[in-house]
Amino acid sequence: MKIEAANEFVIVEIEKFTGESKTESGIIMPGEPQKEFQTGKVLSVGKEADQGFKDKTVLFGQYAGTPLNDTTLAIKSTEVVGTLL
């Protein structure tokens, strides 16, 4: 199924990323806030969205966007936290 993003939306194929605070030996530090972020590869960018996101892997909050199916989200470009290098 091909989807083209409209307006300020970005279509993203999601991957899961958990931001955890660990020591070098792999021990999770107690008392550290555990925030979960998601990453995803941008499939389509709307005309009003930042075109710099096209074909990049982006980072966004766990509650961002609207699920289109099990692996695809439609999120507003303002909900993108950043791109992974």
Image: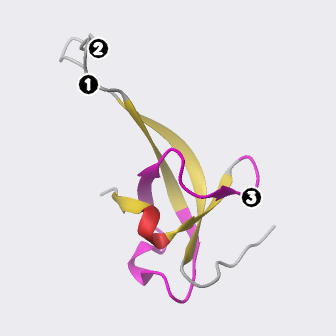
Name which of mark 3 and mark 1 comes first in the sequence: 1
In the image, which residues are magenta?
42-70
Residue appearing at x 61%, y 56% in the figure: 13
Rendered image quadrant of residue 32: top left
Amino acid at the residue labelled 2: Ile
Q: Report the quarter where the C terminus lies.
A: bottom left
Alpha carbons under labels 3 and 1: distance apart: 31 Å
Would you name the residue on which mark 1 appears?
21
Q: Is residue 54 left or right of residue 70?
A: left
Q: Position of residue 79 (x, y in %)?
A: 45, 63
Q: Position of residue 41 (x, y in %)?
A: 52, 59
Give the vertical position of 3 relative to 39 (above or below): below
Name which of mark 3 and mark 2 comes first in the sequence: 2
Q: Are marks 2 and 1 in contact (CB under 8 Å)?
A: yes
Would you name the residue on which mark 2 appears?
28
Alpha carbons under labels 3 and 2: distance apart: 34 Å
Residue appearing at x 18%, y 17% in the figure: 24
Amino acid at the residue labelled 3: Leu
Q: Is residue 22 left or right of residue 17?
A: left
Would you name the residue on which mark 3 appears?
68
Marker disc for residue 85 = none
